[in-house]
């Protein structure tokens, strides 16, 4: 796995003596994209130590996590199972088809009882010290949705290194809160960590983040008013911003996480949220499966967002030749 991470300036965000840069985790791999590799790395190590034969996890029809898990399992000679928040009668999405192509067996467990069924699986031989679950009888090692858990946060903590210590603010999108917890754990004392929640009315997320903190007294900021209507919801403002950013900076974004993250950072800079002279590091956490959910239309804005997934993959492959 390529672990050399690029930090690029975001010129269009950098003014009022504020310097904004982006940590391009999306460049490390086209499939196990961005934070997915970091969140999975110690789970795979632990699964191997348990002599597991299969990795299993949970996600929606356009889950970056399930696609990444399927590929990572294959590369480590493990089988994989994806428990999907959908029914078997639903149309198979391109994301789920891709996971199948990597060898993942899909189990459709519906939407209404998804959390209940997930929790029952995760309760199997639960190891509280690592928040992991392993079924010795079947050889299945269960990973929570989005890689949530102590090992996921431990892996996410390795996103930050010597190159990132000069920044005053670390800003990332928040779904399960796993990555943000890892960033908080790894942040230097002078650094302020800000999470941009992509969920609407998610009252439990702060507690879930704190549950993964090594030092419970460490502080962080969670901003919850940039979700643009809720998880995976879009509007013309978001779509326009994403396309404009692509034209200016050639930074690929997705409608679920990174688009909303960067729109939030742009607004905060303009609103003078940061004091002059601040150095800001935005985490491009990768994963563009959500763009595949966009309807196929002739309008430029949707077709261009759909093309970002293909373009970023093609550029990565060319660089590897």
Image (cartoon, rainbow, N blue to C red):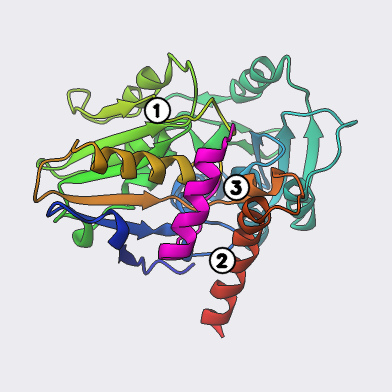
Q: Earlier in the sequence, mark 3 or mark 2?
A: 3
Query: What segment carries the magenta color?
Result: 233-254
Disc 3/disc 2 C-alpha distance (Å): 35 Å
**Can see residue 36?**
no
**Disc 2/disc 1 C-alpha distance (Å):** 38 Å
Q: How far apart are marks 3 and 1 (CA)?
A: 19 Å
| Residue 318 vertical position relative to residue 129 in the rendered view, above or below | below
The image position of residue 181, as x and y in percent, is 33, 34
Which of labels 3 and 1 is toward the front? 1
Q: Is 255 drawn above or below residue 224 in the view shown?
A: below
Which of the marked residues, 3 or 1, is nearer the chain's N terminus? Answer: 3
Residue with the mark numbered 1: 129
The C terminus lies in quadrant: bottom right
Image coordinates of residue 297 in percent, x first then y, are 76, 50
Q: Is label 2 in a helix, a strand or a loop? A: helix
Q: Residue 312 carries which label?
A: 2
Position of residue 230 measured from the top left corner of the image (x, y, whole percent) = 54, 25
Residue 104: horizontal and vertical position, in percent? 75, 48
Q: Mark 3 points at which residue?
A: 51
């Amino acid at each position: 796995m390529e672990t050399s991470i690029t930090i690029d300036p975001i010129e269009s965000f950098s003014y009022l003596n504020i310097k904004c840069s982006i940590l391009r985790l999306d460049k490390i791999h086209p499939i196990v994209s961005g934070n997915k590799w970091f969140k999975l790395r110690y789970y795979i190590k632990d699964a191997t130590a348990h002599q597991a034969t299969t990795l299993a996890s949970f996600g929606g029809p356009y889950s970056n996590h399930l696609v990444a898990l399927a590929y990572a399992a294959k590369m480590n000679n493990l089988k994989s199972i994806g428990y999907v928040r959908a029914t078997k009668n639903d149309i198979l999405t391109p994301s789920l088809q891709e996971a199948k192509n990597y060898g993942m067996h899909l189990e459709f467990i519906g939407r209404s009882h998804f959390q209940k069924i997930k929790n029952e699986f995760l309760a199997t031989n639960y190891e509280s010290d690592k928040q992991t679950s392993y079924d010795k009888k079947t050889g299945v090692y269960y990973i929570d949705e989005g890689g949530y858990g102590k090992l996921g946060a431990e892996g996410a903590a390795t996103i930050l290194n010597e190159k990132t210590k000069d920044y005053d603010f670390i800003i990332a999108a928040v779904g399960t809160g796993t990555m943000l917890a890892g960033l908080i754990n790894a942040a230097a004392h002078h650094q302020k960590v800000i999470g941009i929640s992509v969920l609407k009315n998610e009252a439990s997320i702060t507690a879930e983040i704190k549950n993964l903190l090594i030092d419970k007294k460490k502080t962080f900021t969670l901003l919850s008013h940039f979700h643009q209507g809720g998880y995976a919801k879009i509007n013309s403002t978001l779509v326009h911003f994403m396309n404009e950013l692509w034209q200016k900076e050639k930074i690929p974004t997705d409608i679920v996480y990174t688009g909303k993250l960067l729109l939030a950072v742009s607004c905060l800079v303009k609103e003078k949220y940061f004091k002059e002279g601040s150095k800001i590091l935005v985490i491009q956490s990768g994963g563009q499966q959500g763009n595949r959910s966009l309807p196929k239309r002739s309008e430029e804005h949707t077709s261009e967002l759909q093309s970002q997934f293909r373009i970023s993959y093609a550029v990565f492959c060319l660089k590897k030749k």
